[in-house]
Structures are given as C-alpha cells and as structure tokens.
Amino acid sequence: MEAVIAMKCLIADLVTELHPRFENTKTLAAPFLYDGDRPVDIQLKVSDAYLKDLMRRAAEGTTEPLMENFAFSSAFNRAAIPFGTMLIHSSALIYNGGAYLFSADSGVGKSTHTKLWLRAFGDRVHIMNDDKPVVRLYDDRAVAFGTPFDGGSGIALNESYPLKAVVFVERAEENAVRVPQNKEIIQKLYFQTAHFVGAAAAEKMLDNFDRLLRLTRFYVLSCNMDVSAAYTAFEAIVGDS
C-alpha cells in the first residue's frame, strides 16, 4: 500500500481530517484542503484490516483505491449526521446557481439522466458530484455541497449551492413528474442515505429528514433515456421554482 498521509479538508463546512493511503483519494481530496485554524470536527481513518474485509465482500473488479474512497465516504456520512448533514446518494446537477439532486438506486440511471441535461442545456448546467453530494441543514435553508467522494466517476467538485429540489428517478416508458407524499419521501430518503447507524444517530437522522422536508421540494421523475426526459423534468421541476 502507499504511504498514509494526513489531509485536513473542509467538507460541507466541516473540518475533516482524512488519512488516505491511495492516490485516488488524495487527488480527489486535494481541492478540499484546509489550512485554517478551526478545530477538527471529524477525523476519519480506515484500517488495513477493515479495508481488506471490505474487499472480500466487494463486487468483482472493485479496486482497493475505490474501496478506500467508499470507506471514507461511509465514515464521513455517518459522522456528519449530528452536524445536520446528510448524504443523499444522487447526481448533483447545478443550474442557475441552484442544486438539483437526482437520486435513485444504483443502476436505475440517475447519472444517465443528468447527462441528458448536459446534452439538452449545454454549459447552462454542470454536475457538481455524480454520486455522493451531501446536504447541510441550516435554520432557514438547505445547502448542497460537493465532496471528495465520487463513486468512481471522477466528478467531485469543491462547490456548494442552495438546494432547490430532490428528485427521485424511476424508469418508465413515458416521462412524467409527480409530487410525492411525505411518507414516500421519508422511505426513499432512508434508502439513499447513510442508514446503517446506531440508535442515537438514527434519531438525529430522522430529525434531519423532518427539517429537510420543510426546507426543500421533492419530486418523483418517471422517465425513459431519451433527451426529452430532460425537457420534461426541467419544465416541471425548474419551472416550478
């Protein structure tokens, strides 16, 4: 393995100390480096034994550098919950100074959908993070932040924008958008965040969900893989701003 180094980063405005071994994580974390004098909020280490255990259970073709990045992501997202911060497994699309998080189970096509927006709207939009952005909750607003955790895409920008909407993506023959009820939102959020946590963190996580319901809008997008899906989503979601 490569040498372990300490990197102090600012992730979602939380001073986070990482101890990565592999160049992949070091490279992704570099834009987030922090040289200020604030105390460390979160300290993350991944042991050799833990990484080896993860690799034994990983899908075929998974590399140790990618697994290390995944392990740091999981640890950060659990540690961030008490700070009113949560992972939303999603592709974070930025338009007109606001973040739209397109969330779905792996393989459904959230990244494919946001790439349709790039085709449809060109440089009017960009992707901040294609798999693991986080949302931090404040008294009167929710803010989406990029992270150095990327899910393998390499898209992991150090940016932040007001959160405009969370969109749950489903496959369908025809394109349509609807507004879900709160119960459905909570169920979908639970499976798209760091939900393997202890009792105390789970209580805080549910409180975070409740706060997020008050601070942003939610949609369910049923869509195919044609570029027309981007126009349907834009009209219903951005046009509703």
Image (spheres, rainbow, N blue to C red):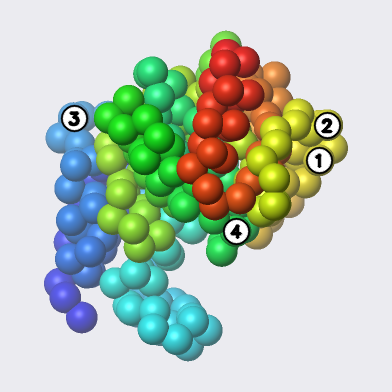
Quarter of the image holding residue 126? Answer: top left
Q: Look at 41% across and 46% down and name the residue there.
A: 115
Taking 183 as reference, is 206 left or right? left
Report which residue position mark 3 lands on: 36
User: Between residues 98 and 30, which one lies in front from this camera angle?
Assistant: 98
**Mark 1 vs mark 4, CA separation in Å:** 18 Å
Report which residue position mark 2 lands on: 181
Classed neighbour count for the residue bearing mark 4: other residues with Cα under 10 Å, few (<14), some (14–19), many (≥20): few
The residue tagged with tag 4: helix, strand or loop?
loop
Q: Look at 76% across and 29% down and name the residue there.
A: 179
User: Between residues 4 and 126, which one lies in front from this camera angle?
Assistant: 126
**Mark 2 vs mark 1, CA separation in Å:** 6 Å
Contact, mark 2 vs mark 1 (Cβ under 8 Å)? yes
Which x, y percent locates residue 117? 43, 37
Q: What is the three-letter code of the residue carrying label 4? A: Val
First in sequence: mark 2 vs mark 3: 3
Q: What is the three-letter code of the residue carrying label 2? A: Gln
The residue tagged with tag 1: helix, strand or loop?
helix
Taking 104 as reference, is 180 left or right? right
Label 1 or label 4, whichever lies nearer to me, is: 4
Which x, y percent locates residue 1? 20, 80
Residue 108's disc is 4
Report which residue position mark 1 lands on: 184
